[in-house]
Amino acid sequence: MCKLQVDHPDVYKRFGEGFHVVRRSDRVWAGLSVDLVIEPVLMRSMKTSGGLTRGRGMTELQRLKWLLSMPACAEVNNAMQELTGVNHNTGDQNKDMTDARQARDMKDTLTVLNYLQERHPFCSDPSLRSISTGVHAHPSVNVDKAKAVGNTILVSMDGQTTAEYTFKKRDQAITMSTKSSVKIDGEAVQMDPQLLFQRLTIAAKASQDLASVFKYELCSHPSALFDISLLLRQPQKPVLADAIWALHTPGHVQYVLDGGALVQRIPWTRGSTYKDICKLYSEYVTRKYGEAVVVFDGYQGTSTKDMTHRRRAGGRVGATVTMDEYMPVTMNKDEFLANNTNKQQFINMLSGHLQKKNCQTYHAPGDADLLIVQKAVESATTTNTVLIGDDTDLLILLIYHANLKSHNLFFTPEPKKSTKKPRVWNIKAVKQQLGPSVCTHILFIHAIAGCDTTSRLYGIGKGAPLKKFTTSSELREQATVFDTQSASTAEVVSAGENALLCLYSGKPGEGLDSLRHKRFCEKVATSTSHVQPQSLPPTSAAAKYHSLRVYYQVQQWKGTVDELLPQEWGWKESDGGLVPVQTDLPPAPLELLRVIRCTCKTDCSSLRCTCKKHDIECSVACSNCKGSGCANSCQAACNDNEDDEDEPGNLH
């Protein structure tokens, strides 16, 4: 084709004149490439009414009749169209040019643009990340260099025949998808977490001690504590508030307003200056709450809430702005506040405007929940106080820190238009109704079932620990360890596992690993579908770090965490922030991981194939066959079935 103009100038001329397409009408958009005409013309006529596939049969005689009758049928068809006037549209209009189609295309385009505008993928941050979740890619991810990876693979193919060349999975581009890498004999193998769990549990049938296998996750991550994006499972904190509400019905209350963090509460008008926006905030506070106390979070340095901030940002990363009061706002509010430096600058500016209105402002070094509650409790020693906030953490901290001998202390969310009558919590009445035992350990009850820095337990609601605490002496005993300031890591780990055993209705001393095995057997025996790994209790290895994070959070809420380092209590530094440690064990025992793939150089037809030996099919993890083209793959079985159906004895 490149030499067409030289070798065949007459053909080249015809191409230039538009004869490379076939037209059945004079419409501009009706031209089809020659190789495509068979689909809308010949194949359509064969498969529609009157075609060969409509019950006429495919014998030689029927095919001959159909072909010879096509010219006569075409003339009858044209005559009927002319008579009825059906084929009257011969204009140049393409369906993609209609008003309805253009309106739909514009709507879809705006949806994509708005999505990208909120998450701003074209920012100064050079790191590779997911714009939907904000999760940064592992250093091994190289999907952004897919072209170079592909070229490397092509170079390795040079000079080799098809029979000689073996495509290795480790050579392909690594993405941020749910397929996680598992190291087997030093080689990284990409496996889907769900598939990995199913294959390992099937392969484990050959193990003599099946119960011991369940001390491993049998999955690429602790799925009972982390979601598919490897983030902490989002806690259902309002459910705990609902559970407390069910135990307490407040009576008449008085409102003495105390301000909270207001940054997310007021919409911004693009084009206004930052001074104008700060003025809107200060007028809003003084108009509704008078000379209030406002406590702000801090966004400098690392914090155990780094992952929570990342999840709330929804993957948006705003560019850093050097701002002053008279600079106009040119960015979307959410995009601006997605950058911690921008947020800290704005909070500092807003704090100055509020102080000019005689409001008291305080800045926490990190998370401000404890400082907010401390200021509310301090205020309640001299006057009735109402804390305005939407976070369940504030309610839990108030229940723990409030003094029954002080003035009335209330907690209520910010009134919204959709809420006709918001709840108002009389903290003193709540404490009296819950009792001293629950109030003393309310921080542990909240943290063990999931908060911003500890993962929600899959399948365990926030109300369950509160209910279990009132009936189980075992859970109350373990709670005292988490409330002890000088507890060791060994004591916390042991108490945490016993507490989780109690929440999962296990027997004392049974162990989470044994409970996982027992629950797996029960679900296999009763379930109508495959067992999901997250439906099982967490392993002891994963629960250990969960317990450490719970203890650190409880001590932080109590205000006694100054001497503790988060890196020693279930956290590690990564990408300039703190991320939770998931577990210290591999997904499965090494001998079991080796079972999930074979290294056969033959067709996997003998029992020397480890996959066939353990009665599982070969998969893409297998080093040579890659789960296709061997005797122990689903594809081979399907081909065998197709061959069988072609035999005369199988015709029905």
Image (cartoon, rainbow, N blue to C red):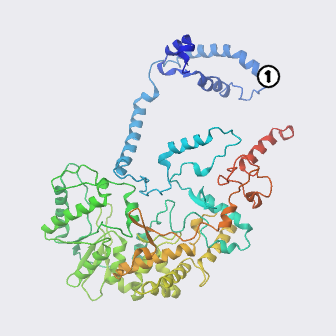
Q: Residue at x 59, y 52 (%)?
A: 170
| Disc 1 residue type (three-letter) | Glu
- Residue located 41% across and 40% down the image: 108
223, 82: nearer the viewer: 223
Residue sticking out furthest to the front: 159
Q: Position of residue 52 (x, y in %)?
A: 72, 26
Examine the rendering and report whether any part of residue 528 can be seen: no
Mark 1 crowdedness (10 Å alpha carbons): few <14, some 14-19, many ≥20: few
* Number of marks: 1
**In front here: 608 or 524?**
608
Determine which residue is flagged by label 1.
60
Q: On screen, 560 above or below 283? A: below
Position of the N terminus by quadrant: top right
Tell me if 108 is positioned left or right of 13 in this view: left
Looking at the image, can residue 234 be seen?
Answer: yes
| Image coordinates for residue 239, horizontal then vertical, percent | 43, 71
Residue drawn 41% across and 37% down? 104
